[in-house]
Image (spheres, rainbow, N blue to C red):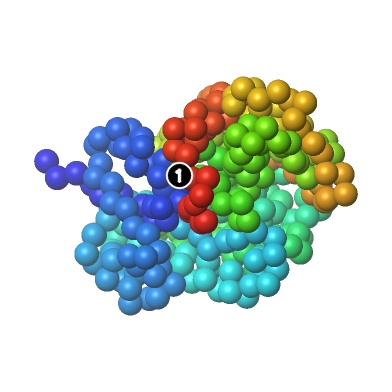
């Protein structure tokens, strides 16, 4: 019997690679991966050719154009345009090819800066996102009305998943562009090698939420089978730990004395906390997340076994 195809965009990212590692979860499907090098999803004709070639039954749209604070500030319009174009091209081709279901990926960073905490889905588009990433944030936020309107007009099955921090094996460990957690893993490993300090920006007090990337593969599978309302849903963990706790867990996993941690209090420490409310998802799914301690342990083990990432300039 011919298997239904699931097209997975952004297949070289940390989340896309997690689908490759956990492909046995989808034995009833044929997973087809695409990357930005293979198809420019902002290009209408290239996207059309991709869909005509693959003819997917389902789509997991993971691809995104993003960067650090400096990049996000400098290229506000580019990030708004490209991320929105990708989503519109994906949506239009899902309609044209009669795709059974399309799961779009949003971002907790899209929510307004002054959202009531913990942040509920209803906060979206009720105010302005943080100025550091306006273009990217608005491109993600506007996917909610895209889902609503396409579902209403075309009777399509579109949903939107809102993750919070993603980390795990095959993450971006680049020293200039990586997020806080993978950056600390890399710096901790190098500190151990050189018997130096593990330098951490700020004072360690801000709280962060990070979800182990393999959990998201299970979450997408659950949503594929069970969530069919034309809505967005927060799917990240509710576990919240301080940066100090996270740094200590990394030291524990890499067998480093925590006394090597040195806080650079002259550096910015970022927003104090921005927790996500995942109660709707938990109520419906009963999902149990990998603890941050266990996820960090798995990620550090993978990193130790893949030391080539230390010299990687941009692995995404």
Residue furthest left as drawn: 1
Q: In x, y percent, where is residue 114? A: 81, 53
Q: Quadrant of the N terminus?
A: top left
Residue sitting at x 63%, y 56%: 176
| Residue visible at 53% across and 63% down in the picture | 65
* Residue 287 percent across, percent down from the top left: 52, 27
Q: Quadrant of residue 200?
A: top right
Write down the quadrant of residue 291 in the picture.
top right
235 vs 248, left or right, is: left
Q: Can the viewer see residue 163 in this picture?
A: yes
Q: Secondary structure at mark 1?
A: helix
**Relative to 267, residue 76 above or below:** below
In this view, the residue in front, 43 or 188, is 188
Q: Badge 1: how crowded within 10 Å, few (<14), some, or many (20+)?
A: few
Residue 198 x %, y %: 72, 37
Residue 29 in the figure: left or right of residue 208: left
Outermost residue, front side: 194
Along the line of sight, which residue is nearer the eye, 316 or 5? Answer: 316
Residue 242 shows in this picture: no
Residue 5: x and y, percent?
A: 25, 49
Q: Please give the count of numbered marks on the rendered protein.
A: 1
5 over 142 or under it: above or below = above
Residue at 42%, 56% (x, y): give it.
Answer: 10
Residue in view at x 78 percent, y 55 percent:
113
Q: Which residue is mark 1?
A: 308
């Amino acid at each position: 019997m011919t298997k239904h195809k699931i097209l997975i965009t952004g297949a070289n990212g940390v989340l896309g690679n997690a689908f490759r590692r956990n492909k046995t979860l989808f034995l009833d499907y044929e997973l087809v991966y695409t990357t930005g090098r293979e198809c420019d999803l902002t290009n209408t004709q290239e996207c059309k050719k991709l869909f005509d070639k693959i003819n997917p039954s389902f789509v997991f749209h993971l691809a995104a154009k993003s960067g650090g604070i400096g990049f996000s500030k400098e290229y506000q319009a580019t990030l708004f345009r490209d991320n929105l174009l990708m989503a519109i091209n994906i949506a239009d081709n899902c309609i044209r090819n009669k795709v059974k279901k399309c799961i779009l990926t949003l971002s907790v960073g899209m929510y307004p800066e002054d959202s009531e905490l913990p942040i509920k889905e209803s906060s979206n588009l009720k105010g302005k996102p943080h100025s550091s990433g306006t273009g990217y944030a608005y491109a993600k936020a506007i996917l909610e009305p895209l889902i609503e309107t396409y579902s209403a007009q075309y009777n399509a099955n579109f949903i939107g998943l809102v993750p919070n921090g993603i980390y795990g094996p095959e993450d971006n460990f680049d020293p200039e562009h990586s997020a806080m957690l993978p950056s600390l893993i890399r710096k901790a490993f190098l500190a151990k090698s050189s018997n130096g300090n593990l330098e951490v920006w700020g004072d360690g007090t801000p709280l962060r939420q990070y979800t182990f990337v393999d959990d998201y593969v299970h979450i997408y599978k659950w949503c594929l089978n069970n969530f069919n309302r034309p809505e967005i849903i927060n799917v990240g963990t509710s576990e919240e730990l301080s940066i100090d706790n996270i740094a200590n867990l990394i030291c524990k996993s890499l067998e480093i004395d925590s006394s090597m941690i040195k806080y650079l209090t002259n550096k910015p420490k970022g927003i104090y906390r921005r927790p996500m409310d995942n109660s709707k998802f938990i109520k419906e799914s009963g999902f149990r997340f990998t603890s941050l301690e266990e996820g960090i342990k798995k990620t550090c083990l993978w990193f130790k076994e893949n030391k080539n990432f230390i010299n990687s300039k941009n692995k995404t």
